[in-house]
Image (spheres, coloured by chain):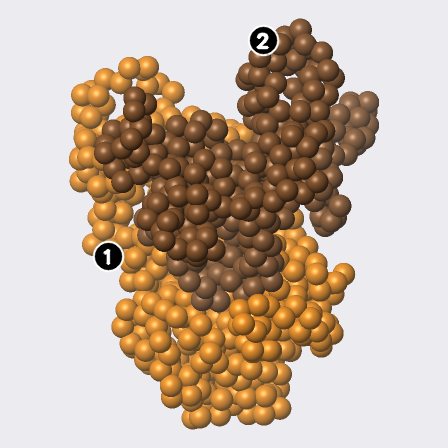
Amino acid sequence: MTNTIAVHMSGVVKRFPGVVANDGVEFELRRGEVHALLGENGAGKSTLSNILTGLYRPDEGTIELNGAPVSFSSPRDALNAGIGMVHQHFRLVETFSVAENVVLGNPDTAFLLDTAAINERVKELAARYDMAVDPEARVWQLSVGEQQRVEILKVLYRGAQVLILDEPTAVLTPIEADALFRTLRAMTAEGRTVIFISHKLDEVMAVSDRITVLRGGRTVGTVDTSSTNKRDLASMMVGRNVEFTRVQRKTPAQANDVVLHVENLGGHDDRGRDALHGVTLTVGRGEIVGIAGVAGNGQRELAEVIAGMRHATTGSVSVEGKVLQSGKARAAIAGGVAHVPEDRLHTGLAAGHSVEDNLALKSYRSSLLSRFGLLRRQAMRDGATALVERYDVKTPSTQTAVRLLSGGNVQKVLLAREFSTGPKVLIAASPTRGLDVGAIESVRERLVEAADGGLGVLLISEDLDEIMSLADRIAVMYEGRIVAVIPADKADRETIGLLMGGSQLEATS
Amino acid sequence: MKSPVRLERRLEQPKWLNWAIPLISLLGALAVGAIVLLLTGKNPLDVYQRIFERGFLSTRALTGTLRTATPFAFTGLCAAAAFRLGVINIGGEGQLYMGAIGASYVGLIMGNSYPVGIVIIAMVFAGMIFGGMYAGFVGLLRAQFNTNEIITSLMMNYIAGIILNYLIFNSLSYWRDPRSAGFPSGKPLDKRAFWPSYDIGGVGISFGLILAAFVALAVWVLYKRSRFGFEIGVIADSPRAARYIGIRTKTTIVVVTALSGALAGIGGASQVGDFTHYLDAKGLQLNSFGYTGIVVAALARLNPLGAIVVAILLGGLTNAGYSLQGPDFPSGLVGTLQGLILFTAVAGEILMKYRVKRNTAAKKATVAS
């Protein structure tokens, strides 16, 4: 009975302060299918699944489970109704055994654990769905793939009929991913239903029966996997035919006069896994190179390795021909690398410190601002006053803590400081994210102005429109690699969307 | 059920709060202490008045108070210096013992053959090095292995106590006086190694307390005016921003923790040089100098100059406690009051960050519903 509707969500609206995360989403799930939920970051996938699992309550709209309307007020409600979620970030007690984790939080568990029986049941469940995992092993001993199986077992043990997997392959090796797909098939063969959240086109095509694409909090459409292809999905995902205009540049970029040269760069992420694989890239004088890609494909690591916040495992970064010492932020700063990090308020700035302190954050060691190890407060104050004036920062005073400023002014402080250090290269990571329209405009103007002045800009953004309108060349990153570099005037959204989703370029070559 | 008041986050923290809130905390502690006293059938006003008299109102009282305040000042600076970085070093106690061990060793060796100025400087440095290295180990563990410094520094207090006992009671160490018949005690320092004290209007002021004031000024400059202090502030505010601008966070943690221990170490040196003139294993452990330092730092809101003032205040309280101890004065009272002060001082931090508002909106809502 594959045509029976398991879940029907209709007109779902969820607002957060300043954002509408779901804006009238339609979603229909048939029993026994693997249904992929596809979309870029911020498209509303996670919000939708959090609503379905009772973590959020929708502001508007209805949810029907097996034809009957339901309203969950907690994940436990949803779980009792048979809907379970496997989160991207595991929620396991590392010092407990697999079986203990599986029964943890289960209300039916007796006060005294019958360990042998539980182990037996977990083992049986694991075998049934082709998941190799030892129930008695401690979770900290397990690989990431095995830990994910524990998460799935947890949900299955509670009797979930609908399983939601949030970006399940993000942490897996290809072999582990294949094993996961087999497990999903085994589950649907028994009549269970799987929602598979992803932004990777290849695996969505490989594993799903149907696909619902979300964009900007709305449902773009639901298609049968057998009757679609990656190219169509990509254009559904990134949107088509949006008119955008390329910014007019006063000074043309000089791509051949290389200021930033990244050669065969490798690097780890915070968990010590390889996040960059031989990235090679150049930025010319006055050139804006955009890095397009779905978040989490190595962009942050790339920015941090260039800025000296992270060690390079292979390769090198050089600015105007001089190789920068790896993993030394001060060397990068001295070498002329300015960096606007993604997390402005807590990485790019010390939020509890004053505007004055923050404007001096990269130059307080210079002889202008300190002498004999002591700060020259008056010079810092004068410098801050001048920068506040010049960059039109709206702040009550230079002594105000930056955390009290609005998002746009926070970014102005950051940009003012970065430009004031006389950089040769600027790494700007999502520089307009979360800003209002006016602030976005002003940040973009600043970037273009700086590039006109000869600065090489590496613009990392998830906003494809931003990249296409500002960049001279576009590099697409996928799983830690630059998969293509395309001149902006030859780029089209579809191709870039495909590349961002991990498709190799049979389409463009 | 809505509470009648609500907390509203302060956008700015006015400067006057810096002294008003410690004052309120202190009064709050006294008020709660008064309840305890009432319950035990004492007249709180009477008790507090006597504390004030015995702590501050005579030259003799003041001399005793300043003597008690001297170690508090150093351990208070020790706690403040580390807390400002977010390193909760509560090992001032043990670091002070180690400082005393180092300083008494140097005092014993050099005491009869060098001029007093040199001996004092050597003793101060020995105290700093011993206390600093002892704390530096805690900092190293925190920086390298991310161990919880609260636990390690606390545990090391006990180890330092054991070392003290070993040196004086359980071994024939260099520190132990071979001539001490019966009860073992430390070898006395040569008179020439005694630190001077000054008589100002009948009130005795130790060299150590004056040193503490200068050290406090130096620490204040270090934190408020120096590049290093700026970096400490950035690390405490945002570790990620520190990484972003290339501050060597691990090194800073080790250096600051060691510096903090060095300050307690001078306190230990001052105990030997100023007051006991031998390594007093028992006396050092009797008074919880290090733990009181935490109260001092908290009430001073980690301000090094404030720590000196607070040290004198708590010195008075403690000193009065010593001299009033007897059948009509509960011996646990001073400790209780100190505990209450720590409690209210920590609670006072909330008032720094939030203001209390009457919950008028909630009232309307309940009327409407």
Residue lying at the far top of the rendered structure: B41
Residue at image position (55%, 52%) is B215
Q: Nearer the viewer, mark 1 or mark 2?
A: 2
Q: Chain of mark 1?
A: A
Q: Position of residue A491 (x, y in %)?
A: 46, 80
Residue behind mark 1: A174
Residue A426 seen by the camera: yes
Tell me what residue is drawn at x 60 percent, y 31 percent: B64
**Image quadrant in which you'd find residue B301:** top right
- Give the color of chain A as drawn: orange
Percent x, y for residue A213? 47, 55
Which label sits on residue B327?
2
Disc 2 sits on a residue from what chain? B
Across and down, in percent, residue B174 comes to 27, 40
Q: Position of residue A418 (x, y in %)?
A: 57, 74
Nearest the viewer among A384 and A106 is: A384
Which tint is chain B?
Answer: brown
C-alpha distance separating marks 1 and 2: 79 Å
Q: Quadrant of the C terminus of chain A?
A: bottom left
Q: Is residue A281 left or right of residue B300?
A: left
Q: Mark 2: which amino acid?
A: Pro
Q: Say which element carries label 2.
A: loop
The amino acid pointed to by label 1 is Pro
Q: Total number of numbered labels?
A: 2
